[in-house]
């Protein structure tokens, strides 16, 4: 599955991490792990669907996906292509009026947030674009028109940096110790801007750290202990919730991002 990555223009760089163009010549299913960046996707060719244990859910042309707590299986039909906008962790708030915690575990069609007529124009322009550079320009033009201002919050930015530095192994009271803010006030600001509670966000960071640290033929008890889990059953439970598979199944066979 070819994947091309592009950097945002200078005016959108404070909010967007990158653009990914995913193309699939053949039918394929890919596992997408929870990450700390919310996404916006524009499918300009073919068809995609979320695969769930008991059914599939066809995706519309454009969606916004909030932070997730478990992996999603995305099925690509033959000859499918999608542009995915990966926002920086505080970036999407600059484009939406809604508190972002309302998007947690959700994937919602773009026309819920923006006028359908505008989305149809974007879809038409993407369909007739002749190159990926042209398609990126279409998406950037749309995003620029929706930019409502810089929602930078230094306190939340600092707390995110500390969660990452600790690889997610940090208690919320440890964060509060140097922030001089009540727990309720801090969590309200965090959820509104980041799209999850601090605890939920830290769990995403922690599990991604576990996966990055995987070794060839790892000792799973050691992997659990090194990442702050008290016992193997606790680690196995959290790992399966996050990836949909046991550690052995996941590291042995899964195609994932």
Image (tube, rainbow, N blue to C red):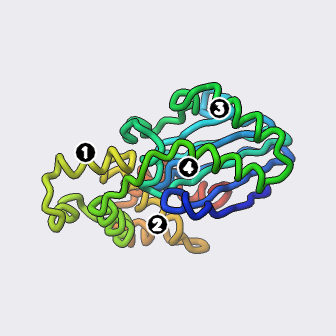
Quarter of the image with the C terminus is bottom right
Residue 93 at x, y percent in the picture? 42, 47
Q: How far apart are marks 4 and 2 (CA)?
A: 17 Å
Q: Counting residues from the N terminus, which is met first, the one under dot 1 or under dot 3? A: 3
Alpha-carbon span between mark 4 and mark 1:
32 Å
Closer to the camera, 220 or 126? 126
Q: Which of 178 and 68 is in front in this view?
A: 178
Residue 188 - label: 1
Image point 24% across, 48% down: which residue? 187
Q: In this view, does 147 lie to the left or right of 117?
A: left
Q: Which of marks 4 and 2 is in front?
A: 2
First in sequence: mark 4 or mark 1? Answer: 1
Give the vertical position of 146 relative to 108 (above or below): below
Residue 159 lies, in percent from the top left, at 30, 63
| Residue with the mark numbered 4 | 245
Give the mark nearer the N terminus: 3 vs 2: 3
> Is the residue marked by circle 1 packed among few (<14), some (14-19), or many (20+) residues within 10 Å?
some
SS at mark 4? Answer: loop
Q: In which quarter of the image is residue 248?
A: bottom right
Q: Residue at x 69, y 29 (%)?
A: 120
Viewer-side label of 4, 1:
1
* Secondary structure at numbered mark 3: helix
- The local secondary structure at tag 2 comes to helix
Q: Distance between the residues labelled 2 and 1?
A: 26 Å
Percent position (x, y) of residue 19? 64, 56
- The residues tagged by marks 1 and 3 sit, at their Cα atoms, a distance apart of 31 Å
Q: Are marks 4 and 1 in contact (CB under 8 Å)?
A: no
Disc 2 designates what residue?
209
């Amino acid at each position: 599955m070819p994947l091309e990555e592009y950097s945002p223009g200078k005016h959108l760089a404070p909010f967007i991490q990158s653009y990914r163009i995913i193309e699939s010549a053949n039918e394929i299913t890919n596992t997408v792990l929870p990450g700390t960046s919310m996404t916006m996707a524009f499918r300009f060719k073919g068809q995609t669907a979320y695969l769930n244990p008991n059914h599939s859910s066809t995706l519309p042309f454009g969606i916004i996906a909030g932070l997730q707590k478990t992996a999603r299986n995305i099925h690509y039909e033959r000859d499918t292509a999608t542009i995915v906008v990966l926002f920086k962790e505080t970036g999407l708030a600059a484009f939406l009026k809604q508190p972002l915690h309302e998007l947690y575990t959700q994937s919602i069609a773009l026309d819920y947030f923006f006028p359908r007529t505008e989305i149809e124009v974007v879809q038409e322009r993407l369909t007739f674009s002749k190159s990926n550079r042209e398609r990126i320009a279409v998406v950037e033009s749309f995003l620029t028109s929706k930019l409502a201002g810089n929602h930078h919050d230094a306190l939340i930015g600092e707390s995110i940096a500390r969660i990452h530095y600790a690889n997610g192994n940090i208690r919320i009271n440890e964060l509060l110790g140097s922030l001089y803010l009540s727990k309720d006030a801090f969590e309200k600001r965090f959820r509104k801007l980041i799209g999850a509670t601090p605890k939920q966000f830290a769990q995403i960071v922690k599990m991604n750290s576990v996966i990055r640290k995987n070794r060839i033929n790892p000792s799973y008890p050691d992997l659990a202990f090194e990442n702050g889990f008290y016992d193997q059953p606790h680690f196995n439970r959290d790992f399966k919730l996050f990836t949909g598979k046991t550690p052995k199944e996941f590291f042995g066979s899964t195609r994932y991002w």
